[in-house]
Amino acid sequence: MILHLQIPSPPKLQLAQTAAVARCLCNGSTSSSTDSGLNFRRKILYLQSLNVNHKKALDLNPTLRSTPLSALHSITQCLSSMGLDIAAVGRILDMHPKLLTADPYADIYPIFDFLLHTVEIPFPEIRKSITRCPRILVSDLEAQLKPAFEFLSELGFVGANKLTSQTTVLLVSSVERTLMPKIEFLTRLGIEHVEVRNMVLRSPGLLTFSVERNYAPKLEYFLKEMNGDLGEIKRFPQYFSFSLERKIIPRHRLLMEHGVSMSLPEMLKVSDGEFNVQLIEKRLQMAGDRPL
């Protein structure tokens, strides 16, 4: 006797339920993919509304791809709360896409607090500090900003000479690689440290100039071609802030050509028109002084 085993077919209801589950899984995957693409598109549109180059931002900060849109809103609100208008916020985020994925409370607000309470920049001026030097927002507070502030304070940037919104750019300078070499270069010339200190307090921009590209060639020209003395540099350290090729050399050659002498401030602080007027006046004065 042969037994015929018969496998029962699943009930129609069970088949319908299985098909429904399969459709749900399939639709869920598609929906998830669609939502992800939609959210990414929203981020791109938001970045574009801020005039942030999203391609550059994604290249420089790949983490941005998985960052929620709400995080971008938080960063924007964080920067806006410090007085920056939306156009300035967009420029800063475009310059430093790293900020787009920063944690406002761990990364940004501590720097604001440092500027406000340690450096003592008045709140309305913090906006100017950041606008002039956005890099301050991506600088390490403990390893960079605080050591620079301590060095500058010891140098004399305190009291009436304390850092302002115009000079907080110095805080992003490395003490060892940027600030100290300038001081050492000037002292090696024979300028006393206290005199160097007074020079940089009068002209803080001295601490931002390159020794190789600025100090060395300008000083060489001053000493060799202009036969200058360091005393005049001490009195007018702003000399180093003028272009050697576009202003110092052309004006000095004109003076030599006409046999006229001027102090560094007379020669450099005025516009081209005023310089030419001064040159003519001195030539006329020289002609009037000659004996008949």
Image: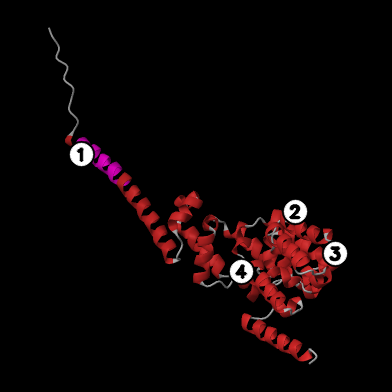
Is label 2 in contact with label 1 (beta carbons under 8 Å)?
A: no
Q: Amino acid at mark 3?
A: Ile
Per the image, the residue denoted by label 1 is 16
Q: Residues within 10 Å of mark 4 (few under 14, many from 20)?
A: some
Q: Amino acid at mark 1?
A: Ala
Q: CA distance from mark 4 to mark 2?
A: 23 Å
Per the image, the residue denoted by label 4 is 132
Asked if residue 282 can be seen in this view, the reply is: yes
Per the image, the residue denoted by label 3 is 191
Q: As drawn, is 6 to the left or to the right of 187?
A: left
Dominant secondary structure, magenta: helix
Nearer the camera: disc 3 or disc 1: 3
At mark 3, the secondary structure is loop
Q: Is residue 24 magenta?
A: yes
Relative height, residue 217 to residue 163 (above, below): above
Nearer the camera: disc 2 or disc 3: 3
Q: Which mark is residue 176?
A: 2
Quadrant occupied by the N terminus = top left
Q: Along the line of sight, which residue is nearer the eye, 75 or 89? A: 89
Comes first in the chain, label 4 or label 2: 4
Residue at the (17%, 17%) spot, across then down: 5
Nearer the camera: disc 4 or disc 3: 3
Q: CA distance from mark 3 to mark 1?
A: 93 Å
